[in-house]
Amino acid sequence: MAGKISWFWNERFWLPPNITWADIRSTDEVRYPALEDLYIVFPYAVLLLIIRLCFERLIGMPFGRLLGIKQSANRKPEPNTILEKAYNSVTHNPDEARLTGLAKQLDWSERQVERWFRVRRNYGRPSTLTKFSETSWRFLFYTVASIYGLMHVPSEPWFWDTKKCWEGFPYHAIEPFMYNYYFMELVFHWCLIMSVLFDIKRKDFLPNIIHHFVTVMLISFSWVCNFVRIGGLVLTCHDLSDVFLESAKMAKYANRESLTNVLFAIFAITFFFSRIVMLPYRIIYSSMVESHAIVGFFYSHIFLNGLMCVLQVLHFYWFYLISCMVYSSVVKGKVGKDNRSDDESSGESDEIVENHLNGSAKKHANNECYATEKVP
């Protein structure tokens, strides 16, 4: 076992040539990142999860009620074995042919079948107040993390000159603010992974899970190898756009349409400049080109670049979804509007609210309504 562990931590993979683990071991005078530092993350992630649940119940929900958001319960659908089987085995949204076949089989109108599917989809769906409470927690974290990062990172010379991220590498002592910043982010993303079992399931569930795991791997890996300067740049350009996304969703749940549009516009602009321009053309470029010229080649650096490229592919995907929403909003008209008058349409409207701020453009029912999936 010891041999396998030593093989895994082979310095030829993790560190630049002629550097050993002993060279970057902390002393009384200087502190370097170490694997042992990551052990404290998990108990803090559990603690943060408990704090989150308390916040949502004791602060998020009361604040939502203060804004006029109600805890509405979705109506239970009429028991029907045939429709339930079709719902589970075929699709939650039957096409026109399937809808006609089910209507003839049950001697119902197509409208009745369509209404049953809509009620069934809405049944068990979290209320707008629950979604507002969950969103308010993420808004709080991203706001705190953004303020903390912007208070410290831009004051470092390597923020303005990315070559300094590699000069003297890996002998970069870890500053107290960077230690706190890294672990704040790592604990939060582990908390997100731990909470997927009871969080609201969104249509881009898989891309978000991939994003969470890649982020955790990127933070942990960059810590162990002391890529903390380039990692700090990645963290800084990520959180700010999320502040405006979560605040736009909160405004949407509270039916503040004008505020929602303003916040979403700021989010789209911030997302574009931070994740589509700054991240690939400044940060990833520095990690791929400048580092090679200054430090040279070593294997773990390829892995770091690979993780950042996976992250960037997700960003391009989400920006495409944002662009679809903006295009449909400008060209097609108001996004997220549902003109149907069914009693159970409120649940559908909640879905449109989510999609308006969360994903890919699509047609909605009989209207030319367009929506978008979640952008983390």
Image: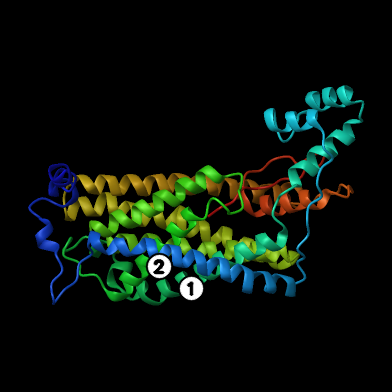
Q: Is residue 226 visible?
A: no
Name the amino acid type tagged 1: Val
Q: Position of residue 263 (x, y in %)?
A: 63, 65
Quadrant in which residue 71 is drawn: bottom right
Q: Residue at x 64, y 54 (%)?
A: 357
The answer to whether the residues at label 1 and label 2 have Cβ atoms under 8 Å apart is: yes
Q: Is residue 97 left or right of residue 311?
A: right
Residue located beneath label 2 in the image: 184
Q: Residue at x 17, y 48 (%)?
A: 9
How is this picture coloured?
rainbow
- Disc 1 secondary structure class: helix
Q: Position of residue 105 (x, y in %)?
A: 86, 22
- Disc 2 secondary structure class: helix
Q: Position of residue 170 (x, y in %)?
A: 17, 61
User: CA–CA distance between discs 1 and 2?
Assistant: 10 Å
309, 108: nearer the viewer: 108
Q: Is residue 34 above or below residue 339?
A: below
Q: Residues within 10 Å of mark 1 (few under 14, many from 20)?
A: some
Q: Residues within 10 Å of mark 2 (few under 14, many from 20)?
A: some
